[in-house]
Image (cartoon, rainbow, N blue to C red):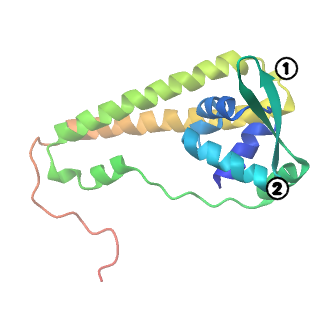
Amino acid sequence: MALSHAILSALIGCPCSGYDLAKQFDGSVGFFWHASHQQIYRELAKLEQQSLIAAEAVAQEGKPDKKIFSVTGSGKALLKQWIAQPSKCAPTKDDLLVKLFVGYLVPPTTLQATLKHGRAQHAETLETYRAIEQAYFAESSAMSLSARFQYITLRNGIHYETSWLAWCDETLETLAVLPDETAATPRADLGDET
C-alpha cells in the first residue's frame, strides 16, 4: 500500500484540511499506517496535482485561507481499483524479535526488562482500542455501512494486541526460568547449511 491510498481512504468520507487530516490520521488510519505530518502534506500536493483530490479554499478571519481537501471521482475510482487488487503480506520488521533471536547473548533479565516495556506499550494501545470500541461501536445494530468496515479494522487491532500480550506473557514466563547467565554457545541453525 502506498501512502496515497491511506490518505484517500481517510479523506473519502470526511473532507478536511491538511492539518485536520494529519490529526485524524494519528487516530484512525495511522494505527495501521504510520506517516509523519510532513509526508502527509507532500502526498496531498501530489494527489492534488494528479486530480485525485480537489482543494476548496475556505476564508478564515485573521488567518490565511484554509484548504479543504476532498476525493474526486478519479480518486474514488483509483481506490476501488486498489481495493480489488490482492494484498501482499507485509514483511515483519520488529527489532524486538531480532533481539530475542540472539537473546542468549545477554542475561534473561535484560530481555525481561525490554519485554515489560513493550508489554506496557501494547497494553496501552489495547486500552485505546477498547475505548474507541466503547465510544463509537457499542451499538452494532445502529452502525452505518462505513462504520461497520471501520469496526472490522478496529477488531483486527484488538485481536493483534490481545495476541501480542499473550505471547509476551508466555515469553516472560519462559525467560523467568532460564539461568541468569549469558550463553557462549552459538545458536542452532534454522536453515540449510550453505
Image quadrant containing the C terminus: bottom left
Q: Give the left or right position of residue 11, taking residue 107 as reference.
A: right
Image quadrant containing the N terminus: bottom right
Which residue was labeled with disc 1?
142
What amino acid does circle 1 point to?
Ala
Q: Quadrant of residue 139?
A: top right
Q: Earlier in the sequence, mark 1 or mark 2?
A: 2
Taking depth in this image into account, of 161 and 29 the one nearest to the observer is 29
What amino acid does circle 2 point to?
Leu
SS of the residue at dot 1?
helix
Q: Quadrant of residue 181?
A: top left
Any part of residue 34 in sight: no
The answer to whether the residue labelled 1 contacts the one labelled 2, judged by CB atoms less than 8 Å apart, is no
- The residue under the point 57% across, 39% down is 37
Q: Residue 117 in the image: x percent, y percent?
A: 32, 31
Q: Residue 182 in the image: x percent, y percent?
A: 10, 49
Q: Residue 13 in the image: x percent, y percent?
A: 82, 34
Q: Give the left or right position of residue 14, taking residue 194 as reference.
A: right
Taking depth in this image into account, of 27 and 52 the one nearest to the observer is 52
Q: Give the left or right position of residue 59, taking residue 159 as reference.
A: right
Label 1 and label 2: CA atoms lie apart by 30 Å
Q: Quadrant of residue 102?
A: bottom left
Any part of residue 108 in sight: yes
Q: Residue 135 in the image: x percent, y percent?
A: 68, 16
Which residue was labeled with disc 2?
78
